[in-house]
Image (cartoon, coloured by chain):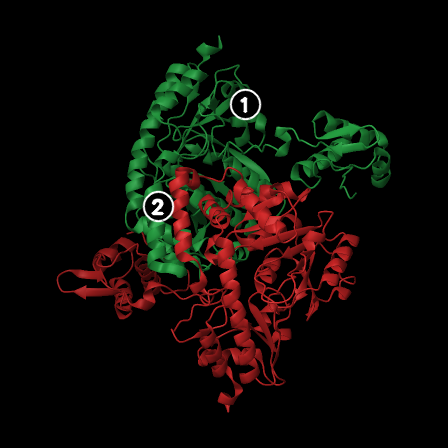
Chain colours: A green, B red
Amino acid sequence: MRIPLDPGSGVPLYRQLEQWFADAIRSGALPPGSRLPSTRALAADLGVSRVTVGTAFAELHGGGLVVAAVGSGTRVAPVLPTAARRAPTPWDDAWAGRPQEPDVVAFTGVGDPAAYPVAEFGRTVRQVLAREGAAALGYAPDPAGDPSLRRTVTQLLASQGIGVPPESVLITSGSQQALALVCQVLVRPGDTVVVEEPTYDLALRLFRTVGANLVGVPVDDHGLRVDRLAEVLPGSTLLYVTPNFQNPTGATLSGPRRRELLRLARAHGVPVFEDDFAGDLRYSGRAIPAIKSLDEHGHVLYAGTFSKLLMPGLRIGYLVVDGPLRPRLVETKQVTDLGTSLLLQRALDRFVTIGRYQANLRRTTRLYRERRDTLTAALAEHLPGATFTVPAGGLFTWVELPPGRRSDELLVAARDRGVDLASGDRFYLDPADGLRHVRLNFAVSPPARITEGLARLGYSQRK
Amino acid sequence: MRIPLDPGSGVPLYRQLEQWFADAIRSGALPPGSRLPSTRALAADLGVSRVTVGTAFAELHGGGLVVAAVGSGTRVAPVLPTAARRAPTPWDDAWAGRPQEPDVVAFTGVGDPAAYPVAEFGRTVRQVLAREGAAALGYAPDPAGDPSLRRTVTQLLASQGIGVPPESVLITSGSQQALALVCQVLVRPGDTVVVEEPTYDLALRLFRTVGANLVGVPVDDHGLRVDRLAEVLPGSTLLYVTPNFQNPTGATLSGPRRRELLRLARAHGVPVFEDDFAGDLRYSGRAIPAIKSLDEHGHVLYAGTFSKLLMPGLRIGYLVVDGPLRPRLVETKQVTDLGTSLLLQRALDRFVTIGRYQANLRRTTRLYRERRDTLTAALAEHLPGATFTVPAGGLFTWVELPPGRRSDELLVAARDRGVDLASGDRFYLDPADGLRHVRLNFAVSPPARITEGLARLGYSQRK
């Protein structure tokens, strides 16, 4: 058998071997009942000791993945333990937020599925197919996105003070793909990416897949500590920032800090990726101009999405990009997936232009504002001693636990009590830095459930 | 108004100003009918002379973008000139194959839009939204794809002799994304990728964006010249192959060559990417087992798509992958776009499981077989001296022009006569190698139009 072992990796060889077999069994590559080589043969084959192979097999046996039978050696278990059929992945309930049991109160996920305009969007898809027929089911003629949707996006942007032509808009499969394309074009292994700390966990994971060296700059109540940028920007390749209702802290970057951030980024020649994932979802305070609206020299890559305000399942976002980077990004987008689904682009365009987007945004803003206020009140009542942010918009409240409490322990206790939340560790470069915090998404559950969830979490119950 | 002017740019200020307004008008940031500031006010605001502003406005007026009315100053034209609405881009007609004029005969594109099951698919989307509601509009809980669609894909694969569990299937945004993900995970700049020559042009462009060193192996009537593989495989990172109805030649790799290819790839430790982009679209001859169906050691990455058989606009494909590469590919898929649109996955799953996919495939196969035969007859009649392939399936006929004829010249002449085709140069590492060939897609146009198109191309008319 060809099993890749890396003696220099720091992971013990028996553990590497065990992991390889576990993956092969879970994936079905080694189907239930199939026979494993003998420890003797495998050890000889791989040039490792029989003890190493034996230890790996013992671990697999302990996990219920293999069985040993007299006279027939080691075989893959005929019936795999439920947990082994598919390795649970850390993201299973992170973004999806689907409660495993009906009674779980979810503070994870994106928005409230009950707020998705299902019927209206269904009607829109029908209308697009009726009016445009097969044309809506072909390849998008322009890999940068449907021209009409790009115009519509510029109108939404103009209402936020960002004046750009449709030629600057690149339609992507969610704003996540916008960031992924920029990484592919700009970031080489070993390049430094400067991030807020804490920051959006899937951005951290993306930067890691491209081999970036990550440098964190702390966030306070007014967003990124811009006064700490000058020491880390020199020599960096990209600055990733979520100025509005930051994920996970909910903080909004102040106007003066935005201007100073742009000035520093220009001075050091570092492009800025502005991830405005929920900029339209504002509940209080004044709108602060996007960094992109201050950008006169094409220094800022601005990404937005329809996922948070409408339906995550659409997977449509956009990137505003000009200048020499643009043709490289469009080429990368085209060779990556030939363009985002035209049917969804056409349906979304129609949905926005006939005003349903704005109506849905108004409705959603009212709904989520009430939930933010409900969560704020419930936190004060049920988690005395915890401190928390009151975000001006978006989805997230960031809770600092009282001294002596750990978020990973709270996570386990919460699950026991039917509450799903995000422990702070996943938002930090060093997970240990996040053990004092949890992130609560207040948009997912209706007010009565929010109060119920906080009551379940409340310390009084722990005594 | 905040208008960024750069006195040091070398572009005259009036031109910068004109350009800014033209962009804002084209983008819709300044909607039709809206009022521009007076030249006096704008000049004072920007610190430039009134002559500068007046010249800019005169240019905009000349281009039809603004109108001047006595007593009401300058306004954006209520109806913009067509040319101002959208700048044409070079790829507009590349994949889409949309004729600019109604009379163009298209031998480019994918399939025939008239064969897309528009109404049936619209009904399916409606049913999914009615039955599943908001659940179909959320994030896909599993970034590797909807479990039900993955099961459905394994059933389609089983009918082709590829027996894999749903856990081996990764749903992607078209098979292009499957290849892009493999490139991201496997191919580093400078790594060698072995390709058929000629081969699919967008695969070549993808390999180039990741900095691969490309090595071509010739194709003959039985597909890739496997006897030439041994000299190029050592030290290579990936072998990319399209065994069925190859793009662009239409050739099918013979059974013995498939086995030999797999043997060599294993011997040299080079993973195989098998792109079966149209394997179901067979018109004649026996089905030959996929290389993946011979693969007992997880050496082959197999990609399929629904684009060619159904609707390109769906952008749904899949990759079959096991072993240690799989978790890395799933992670890359997730951080790239958080998973393919769940709504489209659910709709496609339902479309296939209720049998509409098979019905559509039978209908499409009959339709395209007739068109292949029509093209074959028309080639013999109208292009005497040219030699061409008669593919057993797929979309493409590969035509070698008579001595002395060049495909780039034919392309220009063809466009003059209202015929759209693909010149061979784009399918070769060195475009000069492709100047004796053109690729004709016979699936796009109905038989009468195919004959008409070939008559227009015919040499007799050139005299």
Q: Position of residue A109 (x, y in %)?
A: 45, 33
Q: Position of residue A463 (x, y in %)?
A: 48, 7
User: Are tags 2 and 1 found on a single chain?
Assistant: yes
Task: Identify the element where label 1 is drawn.
Answer: loop
**First in sequence: mark 2 vs mark 1:** 2
Residue A435 circle label? 1
Pick the residue in front: B58 or B412.
B412
Pick the residue in front: B424 or B318.
B318
- Give the residue drawn at x 33%, y 65%: B84
Which amino acid lies under the numbered mark 2 shown in the image of this protein?
Answer: Phe
Q: Position of residue A45 (x, y in %)?
A: 84, 41
Which residue is under mark 2? A121
The part of the image, by quadrant, that contains residue A362 is top left
Q: Chain of mark 1?
A: A
Specify whether residue A280 is in view: yes
Which marked residue is nearer to the observer: mark 2 or mark 1? 2
A104 left or right of B54 in image: right
- Give the residue drawn at x 79%, y 28%: A69
Judge whether B427 appears above or below B239 on screen: below
Q: Position of residue A41 (x, y in %)?
A: 86, 38
- Extreme residue toward the top, this view: A463
- Give the residue drawn at x 77%, y 65%: B227
Which amino acid lies under the numbered mark 1 shown in the image of this protein?
Answer: Leu
B455 left or right of B23 in image: right
Judge whether A26 appears above or below A101 on screen: below
Task: Tally the numbered discs.
Answer: 2
